[in-house]
Amino acid sequence: MRRLFHFAAAVLLITTAPGMRAQLHLHRDKPAAEDLSWMWQYTEPAPAGNSKALLADVRFRQLLATHLSAPQSFWGKDKTLPETIVEFLGQPRSVVAEQNRYFIATGCVAQFCPERGMLWIDIASPRPLFVFAATHWIAEDKPTDQAGATYTLWVFTSRALDPAHLPRALTRSIAPWAQEPLAGRTVEQIANVILVDPDGQPHQLQPTDVGITQSTEQKANS
């Protein structure tokens, strides 16, 4: 009887062990959520945060290199995307937190602020989504100090997004930022929107796809 019991126990162990091993293997290989809580410190002091300290933090540059590595050509073929992001935030504007979840840094290119950048991160997600948006002046059109000067909005993402169903939280941030008045009280006219996947695949969008609605001669009212 004892031998029969030992045999049954051995059979049970053999038949269940693979499943148990698989569960343990999956548990062991499941990547830990990335801790980006250190970034919140740069949203203080409110309301503009501390952009200069953020740009100087070596962890920030490493983060960009890890999550936003798609090829880019609109800002010079010799520049990587992380280098381009740093330049487009080079003259800092603000670093803010929204809903204790979204981290948003904005700025512009030093000495030429019509070229503006926004870094948006869904920081509270187990798999953070990084998005870099940049307005790039179409030089063949009107000068930047004239109403109706046109721009291309470039949007780079850390993972592929459905162009027809962009996250609402993202478009709610991009739209008001892209239509924010410049120093001369004009508003950048977004003529083109190009969404770029992590592998460099571009998708042509309409401004309304990212929530932007504006007239050709639109000006700020304030």
Image (spheres, rainbow, N blue to C red):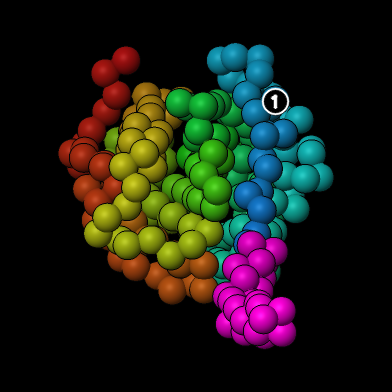
Instruction: Indicate whether 154 appears above or below 28.
Output: above
Whether residue 188 is visible here, answered yes or no, is: no
Residue underneath mark 1: 41
Query: What range is drawn magenta here?
Result: 1-29
Give the camera-side residue of 58 and 207.
Answer: 58
Q: Residue at x 67, y 34 (%)?
A: 37
Q: Looking at the image, which residue is at 72% across and 44% down?
A: 60
Q: Quadrant of residue 195?
A: bottom left
Is 11 inside the magenta-drawn segment? yes
For badge 1, the amino acid type reads Gln
Percent of width and height locating residue 72: 55, 66
Q: Quadrant of the C terminus?
A: top left
Q: How far across and down, in percent of the image, does residue 129 sit?
A: 51, 51
Query: Predominant secondary structure in magenta?
Result: helix
Where residue 44 appears, as percent x and y from the top left, is: 66, 18
Residue found at x 49% / y 58%: 157
User: Relative to 194, does residue 14 appear above or below in the rendering?
Assistant: below
